[in-house]
Amino acid sequence: MPELQAGDFLTSPGAGKPRTLGIIAGGGTLPGQVAAAAAAAGRRVFMIGLEGFAEPLMLAPWPHAVLRMTAAGRILAALRAHGCQDLVLIGSVRRPSLLGLRPDAEGARILARIGISAFAGDDGLLGAVIRVLGEEGFRVIGAQDVLREVLAPAGLLTRAAPDDLALADIRRGIAVARALGAADAGQGCVVQQGLVLALEAAEGTDAMLARCAALARPGPGGVLVKLPKPSQERRADLPTVGLETVRGAAAAGLRGLAFEAGGTILAEREAAIATADAAGLFLLSLDPKSVLEGSEQR
Amino acid sequence: MPELQAGDFLTSPGAGKPRTLGIIAGGGTLPGQVAAAAAAAGRRVFMIGLEGFAEPLMLAPWPHAVLRMTAAGRILAALRAHGCQDLVLIGSVRRPSLLGLRPDAEGARILARIGISAFAGDDGLLGAVIRVLGEEGFRVIGAQDVLREVLAPAGLLTRAAPDDLALADIRRGIAVARALGAADAGQGCVVQQGLVLALEAAEGTDAMLARCAALARPGPGGVLVKLPKPSQERRADLPTVGLETVRGAAAAGLRGLAFEAGGTILAEREAAIATADAAGLFLLSLDPKSVLEGSEQR
């Protein structure tokens, strides 16, 4: 993909007026934040709410259509009808199984172009979807390019800081999350006193955290580590932490969260940090490489 | 460790009469099976039932003492008092955290010899325990050396066999389980139609399976893959599947289980296979390397 400058999305080559930003929206509040940021910058917005994922209250303020994820023909037609060329894919979706799909005619044609092999692993599928969107004349840009402030800034974001035991757990969690990521199997884990309590796969971070209270050992609590996979499609699928993650971590007795600076979307940032501070948790936004090499940020 | 021949445990160098076999017993029925096999071979047995793990009904038929896992001094004294030199460590335990330990005086001394670093990861800890037991004059042997038939034999054990989709899921599961194992983070996963539904860490296989029904996609069900870690301490911690695993897999809508031939304990074998046959599940005991190379056993 071409490198984007901040704000680059606001200009369209050879056009005086910025074209409408298309937002293909899953669950959560992030799609609305992206829309608001684009609108504040003077850009028109059109949303495709993915049926079963996008929340009606989030969609309501914006011009939108609600369509099934696999109704590719209708999605592309709606985007074209509203003059969208730049697209943001944002919000949580439950990845479909190949055999659970009910594509429309255009969707079946696109599925054939994506190929069955893309369904083995998350990244292949998203990468293929973005490639096909490009072939169809769209340009997929990252939510982080529209909404700079959604990316977690580097450093310690809370009053609480990890002690040496927590830093050791973070290092172990980074090594484990990298191994998961290299196998395209997941991106999060919980480590307590060196023991891997839980590994995240299809259940998502909130469900993984929900089982950790029962698995925890006596003594100091564990840490949640989330990292992008090496092959992660950064335009559409960055790891996300937010208010619910902090609440879940506190309920599980964890002592903090660690995630990659610049590679993680921190949703509802102010509320997330305030809740972490109130619960005594740390939020550490770090460079995983420097932590593994022992020169951690504190 | 010296290579053991089958039946080698029955003879003790320089002694006319085989010494008592010490069994350090966790949960489940396997410790009783090991005891029965040793007794049937003419060997006396003494069990240490680990408090909170070993089941009283399993211990009842055998001479035994119930002791805390960390009461190392009392455990070693009891084993010596009963003339045990060969030891089997078998049955499920919940791995303690370093800071949750309440060692006795001897336990604290032994903990110092094991070293804190052993608590980062399962394998280091068990390996260190076995090393210390060796230094104390004991010889740790694998349950599989006493009870040959507990190891899963190679091949397809059921009437149902994996189809091509299930074989593809098995290959993906092997790759994921190996990545988990290399990071010493877990040994099991569930894969459906190429998607990793669940990864097993401290919750254990039964709890992992319990969440899979809710995570499953429409269409053909997934497979459970369990493999020993590369660094697995094969004398004390082989992956185990059994009747409960088969029941859990059936309840989760899975189509079968795959595990390493010769590297997996198959507990309650007849009941597990009969239950799998009744539910239409396959049990495939395989050589992971040959499956990854495409020459799978069918």
Image (spheres, coloured by chain):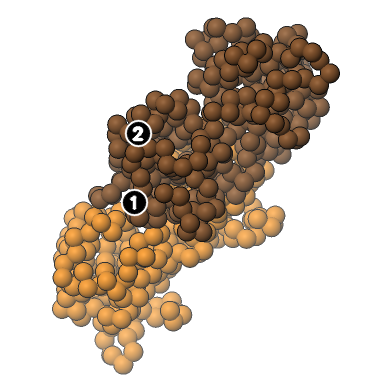
Chain colours: A orange, B brown
Same chain for mark 1 and mark 2? The answer is: yes
List the residue tagged with mark 2: B276
Q: Are marks 1 and 2 in contact (CB under 8 Å)?
A: no
Give the x, y percent position of residue A67. 17, 63
The residue sitting at 21% across, 69% down in the picture is A108
List the residue tagged with mark 1: B163
User: Mark 2 falls on what kind of element?
Assistant: helix
User: Mark 1 falls on what kind of element?
Assistant: loop
Q: Chain of mark 1?
A: B
Classify residue B65 by image quadrant: top right
The residue sitting at 35% across, 33% down in the picture is B276
Q: Is residue B154 left or right of residue A84?
A: right
Give the x, y percent position of residue B149. 54, 28
Residue toward you, A139 or B292: B292
Q: Is residue B19 left or right of residue A296?
A: right
Q: Is residue B209 above or below residue B75?
A: below
Q: Chain of mark 2?
A: B
Farthest residue toward the bottom?
Answer: A14
| Alpha-carbon span between mark 1 and mark 2 | 16 Å
Residue toward you, B140 or A136: B140
Residue toward you, B79 or A53: B79
Which three-letter amino acid code belongs to the residue tagged 1? Asp
Give the x, y percent position of residue A35. 28, 67
Q: Can you see residue B239?
A: no
Which three-letter amino acid code belongs to the residue tagged 2? Ala
The residue sitting at 19% across, 57% down in the picture is A51
Image mark for residue B72: none
The mark total stands at: 2
